[in-house]
Amino acid sequence: MNPFSLIQTIIQASDHGVDYQEGGLYIRETETSEPIFLDAYYTMGDMIIASPDVRHAVARIDPNIPLDWSKEDGRRMILPVIIRSDYNMDPKTKPRSVG
């Protein structure tokens, strides 16, 4: 398990089948089991929360289509990073806001 994160979060910012056709997030129950693709089960704006313990990967998106950064299609996501902090929360040492 990732010692720095108890959960992983993804906010989906595109739609499978609309913005891209192939690839995306998948999980496996074991190293040799068939991948279970997840992108078709959620839509733009959905948040996915998962344990880092889950075997997962991302298959290449639309591998037969040349990458073109000028287009707005493709798989997009927002990754809010949630980590435990070892920062001392003592009010005497807490940073002061600027301004």
Image (spheres, rainbow, N blue to C red):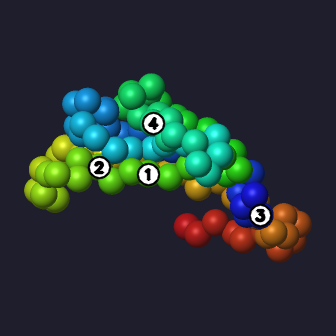
Residue 58 circle label: 1
Rendered view: 16 above or below 33:
above
- Cα separation between marks 4 and 2: 12 Å
Helix, strand or loop at mark 2: loop
Whether residues under marks 3 and 4 lie with C-beta atoms below 8 angstroms apart, the answer is: no
Nearer to us: label 3 or label 4: 4
Task: Say what secondary structure mark 1 lies in.
Answer: strand
Q: Tell me which amino acid carries mark 3.
A: Pro
Q: Residue at x 50, y 35 (%)?
A: 36
First in residue order: circle 3 vs circle 1: 3
* Residue 58 left/right relative to 61: right
Above or below 84: residue 11? above
Q: Disc 4 designates what residue?
A: 37
Comes first in the chain, label 4 or label 1: 4
Q: What residue is at 39 percent from the left and 51 percent from the top?
A: 59
Q: From mark 3 to mark 1, how far is it between C-alphas? A: 21 Å
Amino acid beneath label 2: Ile
Front residue of 98/94: it is 94
Which residue does the image show at 51% across and 40% down from the upper left?
34
Q: Where residue 23 appears, x then y in whole percent?
A: 34, 44
Answer with mark 3 or mark 4, whichever residue precedes in sequence: 3
User: On the rendered image, what quadrant is the N terminus found in?
Assistant: bottom right
Mark 1 burial class by Cα count in 10 Å: few <14, some 14-19, many 20+: few
Of callouts 3 and 2, the N-terminal one: 3
Q: CA distance from mark 2 to mark 1?
A: 8 Å
**Quadrant where the C terminus is found in the figure:** bottom right
